[in-house]
Amino acid sequence: MMPVDGSFEIPLEALARSGLRFTIDTNVIVGRSDPDVQGLYRLHRNGWINLEKTDTLDTERTVGAPPALAARRLAESEELVEVLGPLRWDHSRWDHAVFGSSDDEDRDDEIFELVWDHPRTATSTARDLRDAFHISTSIRYGFDGFITKERALVAASPEINARHPTFRVLDPPSALAMSRARIATIERVEAAKRAIDFNTCG
């Protein structure tokens, strides 16, 4: 459901226990043997956090790849829910995008400039554009953050957060620490409620 203000409401049954929702970068999928990434996947599989992917992730990994390799790469990310960004010419798969608006285009421009310190142009590289698209689509759908190992993207997080206060670009260790801190808070609250209930019943 999309309210009139353009934000997205997430059904409660689709939220993980912590309420944290992250999209992940291509380099996180490739680096799944990293202990911090493995920790994030464990929290995801145990229902504590949601790890998802924008349509850009599979576009980056499959477009131009031989069919067998593309199929293998799709299988590597198939457990992640895909959120569909606005249709971007030469950067979207037709069955994995939605019709966008001028707001989407403005956000793409804004994020590109915040990350790369210059406006996007006709000569901007596909890699630089798609880095911005990952983040822009994540903000479109109200995610808490985008997890990446790319230092330039993480370095741009303060400026992006200043424009979009509920969103951060995080490396895997920071995302894991943020998740564990949220979980620890939830567990303390739940323990306190159990103690109150016990004392009330007693």
Image (tube, rainbow, N blue to C red):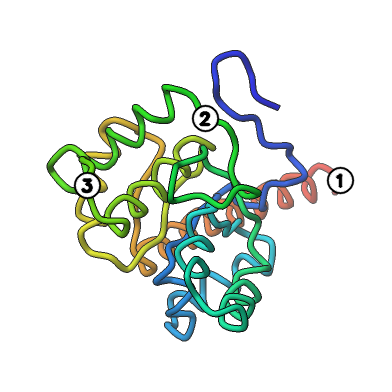
Q: Is residue 138 above or below residue 39?
A: above
**Residue visible at 48% across and 55% down in the picture:** 56
- In the rendered structure, the answer to whether residue 64 lies left or right of residue 70 reads left
Query: Circle 3 — which element?
Result: helix
Query: Residue 2: x, y in percent?
Result: 65, 24
Contact, CB < 8 Å: mark 1 with mark 3? no
The disc placed on residue 201 is: 1
Residue extending furthest left?
117
Query: Residue 22: x, y in percent?
Result: 51, 53
Q: Is residue 97 above or below residue 188?
A: above
User: Of the residues tagged 1 and 3, which is closer to the observer?
Assistant: 3
Q: N-terminal of the two: label 1 or label 2?
A: 2
User: Of the residues tagged 3 and 2, which is closer to the observer?
Assistant: 2
Instruction: Report, in whole angstroms, how far the alpha carbon at label 1 lies from the one at label 3.
Output: 55 Å
Work out whether residue 88 or residue 22 is closer to the camera in this orientation and state it.
Answer: 88
* Residue tagged 2: 100
* Residue tagged 3: 115
The image quarter containing residue 76 is: bottom right
Q: N-terminal of the two: label 1 or label 3?
A: 3
Instruction: Report, in whole angstroms, how far the alpha carbon at label 3 lies from the one at label 2.
Output: 21 Å
Task: Please identify the quadrant where the N terminus is shown.
Answer: top right
Contact, CB < 8 Å: mark 3 with mark 2? no
For label 3, count other residues whose C-alpha is less than 10 Å away and answer few (under 14), some (14-19) or many (20+).
many
Kind of residue indicated by mark 3: Val
